[in-house]
Image (spheres, rainbow, N blue to C red):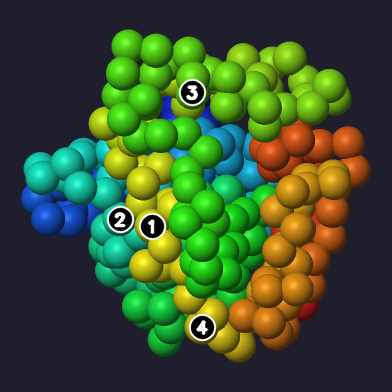
Amino acid sequence: MIRILLGATVLAFVVQPLSAATLDGMKIHSTATGKGTKTLVLVHGWTCDDTSWAGQVPELSKRYRVITLDLPGHGRSGSPKDGKFSMDLFARAVEAVRLEQKVDKIILVGHSMGTPVIRQYAHLYPQHVAALVIVDGLVFAPAQTARAAATPLDTAKIMSPEGLKLREGMIKGMFTPSTPADVQARVLKMMLGAAPATAAGAMAATFDASYWTDEVMTMPACGIFAGKSAMLNNLAFMKKVFPKIEYVEMPGTGHFVMMEQPEEFNRLLVTFVESL
């Protein structure tokens, strides 16, 4: 009994759910774990939630303060009353959590859509950014053609009766034959659980060309990409806007690198953080 009570006490001390962060009347769900001189904020991707990082938090929190959050409309966070999603909204949600946690400098880790989110955060709040970590993320150059601004899924179709099936097909395209079956099942359940309005709104926000800029960000940056990642097709531009970027590919992984090979991902991330 004493061991059980002691374990519960330690868990309550280490894991601190945050419920006070709000933005425009929305509750922004977040959780802080661990402690240390460096704070990592882990930002999930399109129609995902903070459970994307379940394989990272226990290990990273041994060294650092680790904050995860659900972006507006995702997971346990509230949705915008006007139904409008944007990179500004997502970046401001991260800032609301940072303020609530009373931290100054943060290392931002963004997976997939989380990359344009942390890029926009760095644009709005550069004074609070110690470094950026791009996790198989999207880095767009300024839109030059109508084709470049096209979204993978038409937002109207996402809201249609066949929207869920279309989303499922897109998500399955993020896997490889090596993606573990349990990871595929977890990802599908998580992403298909998001409301159609969130899926459509966040997709439109991701491909809103007004956020595609060539702004140069000189803070340290790291890229961790899937094996043979299509995200590296834009590598020249990525090096231009992140002149200090270091990057690596993880062979044999699909889009969800941190879920497919958590130990190797954690090693790569810790190596970068310790170099700062």
Name of the residue lying farthest toward the right: 251
* Nearer the observer, 88 or 161: 161
Query: Which residue position holds label 2?
Result: 86
Of marks 2 and 1, which one's residue comes earlier in the chain?
2
Q: Which amino acid does label 2 sit on?
A: Ser
In 3D space, how far apart are the residues under numbered discs 2 and 3 (Cα atoms)? 20 Å
The vertical placement of 236 against 86, above or below, is: below
Cβ atoms under marks 4 and 2 closer than 8 Å? no
The vertical placement of 27 against 259, above or below, is: below
Q: Where is residue 95 in the image (x, y as percent from the top left)?
A: 32, 66
Query: Which residue position holds label 3?
Result: 167
In 3D space, how far apart are the residues under numbered discs 3 and 1 (Cα atoms)? 19 Å
Q: Is residue 276 left or right of residue 140?
A: right
Helix, strand or loop under label 2: loop
Q: Position of residue 181 (x, y in %)?
A: 73, 14
* Nearer the observer, 256 or 33: 256
Query: Which residue position holds label 4?
Result: 215
Write the residue at 41% across / 34% down.
154
- Disc 4 residue crowd, few under 14, some 14–19, many 20+, Cα 10 Å: few
Of marks 1 and 4, which one's residue comes earlier in the chain?
1
- Disc 2 residue crowd, few under 14, some 14–19, many 20+, Cα 10 Å: some
* Nearer the observer, 106 or 147: 147
Cβ atoms under marks 3 and 4 closer than 8 Å? no
Cβ atoms under marks 2 and 3 closer than 8 Å? no
Of marks 3 and 4, which one's residue comes earlier in the chain?
3
The vertical placement of 78 against 169, above or below, is: below
Write the residue at 49% across / 23% down.
167
Q: In the image, which disc is placed on residue 208?
A: 1
